[in-house]
Amino acid sequence: MRARLIALSILSAIVSFAVASAVLAHPAQAHRASKQAVKHVHLVVKSDAEHGKKGPDGKWHDAFLPASFTVKPGTKVIVSVRNYDEGAHSFSAPGLHVNVLIRGGGATKPRTTRFTFVAPKKAGKYQWWCNQPCDPWAMAHLGYMRGVVVVRS
């Protein structure tokens, strides 16, 4: 019995030494494997009065700028939205499990809202929209109060 305990102790020490040696021999790889990719996205919201974005109708409309962006699958995405509009907006994307209220700010004192999501592992185009009542035309048109998060490698 005692010989078995000694043998198990020696085997345990050998395995521990082998694992520690592998990690110490390749610390950069061990560190890289534990880090998740991160992408910072910066958006701005401007109202029609602040000349958010001109539509094909020749009028200025509320807009998220940019309205669309691209990320890699599985990436942690940190979004910062600076709202120069006094009205509240939202970033609602059911396919990304995101529904965030963007509180109103102002032309001289914008309010910043930050939120995080993890991009799906499946590549594709994930639509988002503002569900807070604002510019009806902009809410119905892609590139204004609607956009796309493109997930691709």
Image: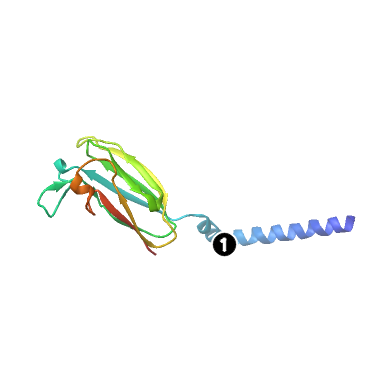
Q: Who is closer to the viewer here, 114 or 47?
A: 47
Q: Is residue 149 left or right of residue 11?
A: left
The residue at the far left in this view is 58
The residue at the far right in this view is 1
Q: Is residue 74 left or right of residue 49?
A: right
The x, y position of residue 18, in whole percent, is 68, 62
Q: Who is closer to the viewer here, 42 or 98?
A: 98
The x, y position of residue 27, in whole percent, is 56, 58
Q: Residue at the location (41% across, 49% down)?
A: 97
- Which color scheme does this rendered protein use? rainbow
Q: Residue at the location (71% across, 60% down)?
A: 15
The residue at the far bottom in this view is 153
The x, y position of residue 53, in whole percent, is 17, 49
Q: Residue at the location (20% across, 48% down)?
A: 138
Q: Residue at the location (65% across, 58% down)?
A: 20
| Mark 1 burial class by Cα count in 10 Å: few <14, some 14-19, many 20+ | few
Q: Quadrant of the C terminus?
A: bottom left
Q: Is residue 94 left or right of residue 67?
A: right
The quadrant holding residue 49 is top left
61 over 71 or under it: above or below: above
54 over 106 or under it: above or below: below
Q: Who is closer to the viewer here, 113 or 18?
A: 113
Which amino acid type is shown beneath numbered disc 1?
A: His
The x, y position of residue 62, in whole percent, is 19, 45
Q: Who is closer to the viewer here, 51 or 37?
A: 51
Identify residue for label 1.
Answer: 26
Q: Secondary structure at mark 1?
A: loop
Q: Is residue 27 left or right of residue 61?
A: right
47 over 37 or under it: above or below: above
Q: Quadrant of the N terminus?
A: bottom right
Q: How many marks?
A: 1
